[in-house]
Amino acid sequence: MPDGYGNPLAPVVQLLRLPDRPGPAHFRLKDLPVMSMPFVRLMAAAAFMMSCGVPGSARAGDLEDCNGPLPAKIEPACTAIINDQSRPADERLRAHVSRSRLFMSRSNLDAGLADADAAVQLDPTSVPALVARGYARQRKGNFDGGLADMNQAIELDPNSPNAYAARGGLKLDRKQWTDATADFTKAIGLKQDYAMAYVGRARASIETSQLDPAMSDVNTAISLNASLPGAFFWRGQVYRRKGDLDHAIEDFSRAIAQSPQPDRGAYFARGQSFSSKGDYARAIADFDKVLSIAPNDQMAQQQRHAAVAMQAELAKVQGTPTPAPVAPKQAVAAPPPVAPAPAIPPAAVPMATIPQGTFPAPPPGLSEAQQLVAQKKYAEAIPKLNTILSGNPRNETALKLRVAALLSTARFAEARNDLDALLRMKPNDSQLLASRSVASTGMRQFDQGLIDANQAIRANPNNAGAYVCRGMANRLTGKFQDAIADLDRAISLNDKDFMAYSERGQAYMGLNQNDKAVVDFDRSLVLNPVNDAARASRGLVLLLKGNSAEGLVDVKNALDRNPNNQVAELGQGLAMLLSGQYDRAIVALDQLVGKTPASDGFVRTLRARAYLGKKDAAGAMTDLNLVLEARPNDPDALSLRGIAYTSMKQYDKALDDLGKAIAQKPMIERYFARAGVYEAKGDVDKAADDYRSAIQMTPANVFDIAAQTQSKLKIQQLSKRTPCGSSGRGDKDDTCL
């Protein structure tokens, strides 16, 4: 969008590369002896390509794709290198190792072992080859052979963290917890940011009932990489064993969302947690999901049977009909429970991008321009395309390529001119109409964007990208429910579109359903780990939820890649506010005020909080009045202005604003603030009522958490000085509420 967010409409096509000395693609982590965990990837998750599908140089491309993160490209690229005997031996060795990892991730164990064997044959002293073969042997059940390979790798390179981590994984499989811990500790000593080694060590600690060290390790892993399903799974196990079932369920849900394939271990663990909470319907749904993956899993069968029996018995006691059981193979995973989410203004941070499939792969020709677009060298591609089109303005392929380059550089008006020309040639082309919707949305002409998206859907009701476009336009105009309906449809048509999840996460933010938003951002980042718009937004949501450690990691990572990412800058300002650095928060938020109309209200309310933190009510009032001039019923601005009026002892005005805010959306902070006004006016009964309301609600955000703590203290203080009257409690000196 042309609103200072670093062109979030541009496609993200950066590919993550394997390290020069790669380690094993996975190591096995098992749950309790009765339940096995899926293999947790050590290599980077696949980035999702969303350009025009233009091929680059075949030979160079094979090498990059083989050692890249895209599974669809790894096998053909590595195979081409392996079959080309003119390639250097080290390239063919790496191709065997990379393809072995891919096969192992697909549980094609024989093919994975064959490739690893071939790599060792090419160079018996190659540490990556030995580690790959050791891991393949481990997966095949040949633990002695696997251990021999890993020991040899460590002898050849005593400073290889991957070799120690791989051996630690093998020792986990053999339940040698102490030895596994030693290997993971060694790997961490060699590579301090080795997130998966922390996860492995945490698993060993859990197995030996050392829950606090395990929690420390998984929290460290998540702070290093917040997109590790295994880290959330094992943190969920720590929470479950500590009896914190709500946090356990949340972590198991995030593990499920981030796993590329259905994760039966996480479904099983979440089902157990739901059963422990007495939520048998959701437990049954999770056990059904396990059985749809592994129909003969006896533990899942037993747990499901027990949950069905408990549900039936509970129904008898409560006098309600027992739900009809669902056949396991037809089961659908239960959605995670959703707690009330933090208040956040509509359309906080536009995060739109070119929907997947907007452009079909162009026909052969225009090779130089095609390659430049594929390499994201848009500034170089556009002049060449201009030259081609000056000679033939109706060259369809050149026009499409220029549209891609113009959209990717936020030159939306020029892109729409080209799309107008293309649509004169093909008036009902659904993909072109969807692309013009992107351009119109980029120009903030949302009505035209909706018109084009609607026409694209009429032309092709199965165009997933068109639903993303319409959802984007709906979200940016505050129609969040409509946006979610469109994005649900897009995901049902193409569940691999990372932007559909990103957009839906944004829509959930607009509805204050931030738990759902986090899960969607997780899913988006699994599909495209370099989607920094999703990463920054996830950081913002986590900060609002009170998870500062994890949220700051996302914000920092997004800023490291793009210092002008305004979503991340907003998160940075919020973090300063939450840590009491009010002056720094104001300076950070000053840079964002007025830059983005859709999020300006949110920025100003955050800055008003910083002014209130400094006890500068006048500064806060300036921001809040500006927000309320544009949106007179904004509940966040009303509640904060009520707090500002309270600090100025204008209690009647404070009560009016706080009452309006509570009427729109009751929240703990608002009740707490109004209770303070009542107490200042001497109306203890009304104050006590509001404090009670505050302590009975579930906190929606970090501000609610603080307000609820204060409300509990206030209740205690009031109880010491409020006489019981004729309540019948003891003598005249007794007090109560």
Image: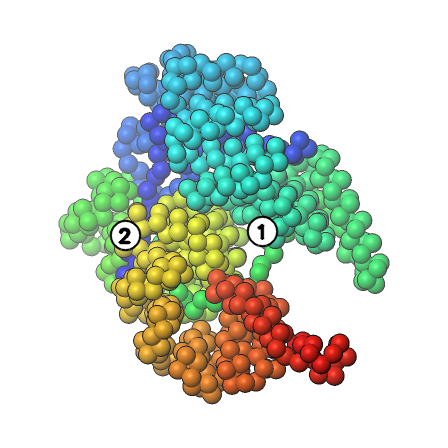
Tell me the element at label 1.
helix
Q: Which residue is mark 2?
A: 563
Between marks 1 and 2 in the image, the one whose residue lies nearer the viewer? 1
Tell me the element at label 2.
loop
Task: Report the front residue among 366 and 22.
Answer: 22
Residue at (36% x, 59% y) in the render? 576
**Could you say where residue 391 lies in the image, as x and y percent from the top left?**
15, 51
- Left or right of 98: which side holds 382? left
Give whichever of discs 1 and 2 has the lower sequence position: 1
Q: Quadrant of the N terminus?
A: bottom left
- Left or right of 228: which side holds 354? left
Q: Amino acid at mark 2?
A: Pro
Residue at (54% x, 75% y) in the render? 671
Q: Is 589 situated above or below 381?
A: below
**Could you say where residue 586 lies in the image, as x and y percent from the top left?**
30, 66
Q: Is residue 274 visible?
A: yes
Q: Which residue is mark 1?
A: 247
Is the residue marked by circle 2 packed among few (<14), some (14-19), or many (20+) residues within 10 Å?
few
**Could you say where residue 221 lies in the image, as x and y percent from the top left?**
46, 40
Q: Is residue 75 visible?
A: no
- Left or right of 60: which side holds 207? right
Task: Report the front residue among 32 and 9.
Answer: 32
